[in-house]
Image: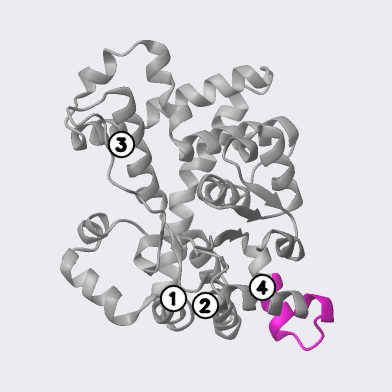
Amino acid sequence: MRTVLTVYLDQNKWIDLAKALYRPDAKIADRENAETLKRAVEAGRVRCPISETHIMEVYRVGDREQRLHLASVFAMFSAGWFIASRQARLSHELEAALTTLLPAENGGLQPHFDPFAQNMLWAFGEIPYLSSLMSISSERLDRISSYAGSIDSLVSYVAFNDEGVRRDAIERMTVSNRELMDRISTRRALTRRESADMRFRVYSAQLLIESLDKIVAALARIGKTFEDFQALADEKKASILDMVPCWDVERCLAVQVEKQWTRELEGNDVYDIGALTAAIPYCDVVVTEKLWVQLCKVSGVATRYNATVLSSVHDIAQHVA
C-alpha cells in the first residue's frame, strides 16, 4: 500500500500556492509546481492538513474574496484532512507519557491516536471537549460534522461566516496565544544574562509548574492520582516534558529563539511556535520560513521527530513518491 506523504504548510506557503493559482501575473514555474502538487494530492500521494492556526489566520484577512481564494486552496491541497488541535494532542500525549511512567494494570496500553481526521471539528478539539465548551451535545456535533462534510465545512466557515463571528474568533485566537507570549517574554527578561542551558532549565520548570492542572486531569483519566506522580523520582517527573512533543517542541524552539534574537517576540512568532508543535512531531515534511527551518534544525527537534523541514513549496516534489 502506498504511503501518503503528509506535508504541513506554513500560512505564507498557502498564500504562495494561492498566488500561483489565482494571480494572472504568477510565474509559470510557480503555477506548474502548484498544479503538480495538486495532481499528487488528487492521486492520494500527498495531503496537506489544515490546523486551527491556519483557519484562524485566514480569519484575520478582512477581504472576503481573498478568504474564499485561500479556503479553496485549502480544500484543493488538504483533501479535507485536518490535524488535531493542541487540546486533543496534549490530552493524548500526556496520557501516553503518564501511562509509560505509571503503568496501569492493562500493561500501559494506550488507545490508538490518529492526529489526522477528515473532520473540521478535529482542528478545534475533541468532541466531548467541544461539546462542553459550546453547550451542544456530542451527538449533535457529530451529526453536524457528518452532514456538512469536511471540505464544505471549511469553505463555509472561512469564507462565509458572519463578520461578528469572525471578529470573535480572532479575539479568541489572540487571547489563547497571549499566554505563551507572556510566558516567553517574562522568562526572557528574568534570564537574559543566563546561559542557554539555564534558560532551558528555567523554561522547563516553569512549563511543568504551569501545567500541573493538566497533569492532574490526565492522571485521573488513567486512574492514577497526583500522589502517584509525586512518588516518582525527580528525574522521572521531569522527563514528562521530554515525552510530551507539544511541550518539548515549544520549549526547544522558544529557548532557541531567545538565544538568536535580540528583538522582542511578536504575535506571529508565537503562532509559528504553536503551529510547529503540531507539525514537527506528526508530519513527514514541514514547509516554513527560512528562519524556522534553521531553528528547527539547530534546536534538534527536526532530527528528533524525523521531520524534513523545507523553506519552499518547490522542494516538496523531490519527496513525493
Asked if the residues shown at circle 2 and circle 4 are in contact, with their CB atoms under 8 angstroms apart, the answer is: no
Q: CA distance from mark 3 to mark 4?
A: 36 Å
Left or right, 44 with reference to 152: right
Question: What secondary structure is found at the residue carrying circle 3?
Answer: helix
Q: CA distance from mark 3 to mark 2?
A: 32 Å
Residue with the mark numbered 4: 37
Say if 80 sits above or below 125 in the image. below
Q: Nearer the viewer, mark 4 or mark 1?
A: 4
Question: What secondary structure is found at the residue carrying circle 2?
Answer: helix
Which of the 4 quarters of the picture holds residue 150?
Answer: bottom left
Residue with the mark numbered 2: 75
Q: CA distance from mark 4 to mark 1?
A: 20 Å
What's the residue at 44%, 30% (across, down)? 243
Q: Position of residue 229 (x, y in %)?
A: 27, 20
Asked if the residues shown at circle 1 and circle 2 are in contact, with their CB atoms under 8 angstroms apart, the answer is: yes
Q: Nearer the viewer, mark 3 or mark 1?
A: 3
Q: Nearer the viewer, mark 3 or mark 4?
A: 4
Mark 3 or mark 1: name the one nearer the start of the chain.
3
Q: Residues within 10 Å of mark 3 (few under 14, many from 20)?
A: many
**Most foreground residue, 161 or 308:** 308
